[in-house]
Image (spheres, rainbow, N blue to C red):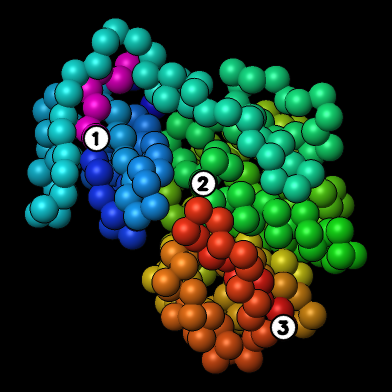
Amino acid sequence: MDEAAKWALDVRATKDRGYDIAEALGFAELADALSVSVFDDGPDHVQVQALYADEATAEAARRTLPNGIEATVSALPDEDWVSLSQSGLPVIRAGRFAVHGSHDAAPDDAEFPILVDAGLAFGTGHHGTTLACLAMIDGLEAGGFAPKTVLDLGTGTGLLAIAALRIWPDAQVLATDIDADAVEVAERTADANGVSFDCVQADGFDTDALSGKRFDLVLANIMAGPLRGMAAEIAAAIAPGGRAVLAGILDNQTEWVAEAFRAQGLKVEPQPSVDGWTSLLARK
């Protein structure tokens, strides 16, 4: 990630396909992107921008895209585009949280500021799913919920793990991600925020770190398909009386995901939609 970005691959796709493409460009085994950013483009589409060190790598990535996807490769001016791709992101607020990049100071009135510079990991707080998760964490604490153990499944930048520690500083937090780059980013982000949690690379629950473990709170801001696929494992990982925050769900996928968790005996409550995305609060 220290190389200079010279070329950009810009992709426009529907939201469901766009996030799959962003994940493939950023985290597939052969991905060589220096950073991947996703921006809303109307109610149903997103723009995905992946930055590369050379044209050949950008073109190779373009050729992996599905047929019918709008995509262009273009040269960039001589700038630090990995940093600049983050610098235009404004401070965002969700409940008592304020998420900001290193290009911005934390707001003076922020009760729980969080510093995030994403680079090669998802989760700057600027997407509807992450905003909803932060608001749900804030609401759980305001309602008197105080978990002693927290799992952040698919942590990305580590934002939700950090948010949990901001609001429940005595909690034991474990974070996982399938991608080694994300684990590295999450650890750096934790250091930058003066907090510490265990972070391991894992494909879902396929790790000794989760074997037989139960958590008072499970945070899973991933995607609808993986959520359904791991419904039984997520439900088993929730301690009696615990909660799960489930996100990355398009509005039209809400019941499809919710029914998988209700089938595991959980009480599932859809939360208000944020920018076309619905999150679920599951209770055991």
Q: Which residue is drawn at 65% across and 77% down?
A: 269
Q: SS at mark 2?
A: loop
Identify the disc placed on residue 217.
Answer: none
Q: Residue at x 50, y 53 (%)?
A: 275
Residue 16 locus on image (x, y percent): 33, 60
Q: Looking at the image, is 230 positioned above or below residue 24?
A: below
Whether residue 70 is visible here, answered yes or no, is yes
Amino acid under disc 3:
Lys
Instruction: Name the residue furthest front.
Output: 42
Residue marked by disc 3? 284
Q: SS at mark 1?
A: strand
Inter-mark Cα distance, 1 to 3: 42 Å
Q: Residue at x 80, y 33 (%)?
A: 110
Residue marked by disc 1? 10
Label 1 or label 3, whichever lies nearer to me, is 1
Amino acid under disc 2:
His
Q: SS at mark 3?
A: loop
Q: Which residue is drawn at 75% across and 34% down?
A: 113
Which stretch is magenta?
A: 4-10
Q: In this view, does 98 lie to the left or right of 143?
A: left
The quarter of the picture where the C terminus appears is bottom right
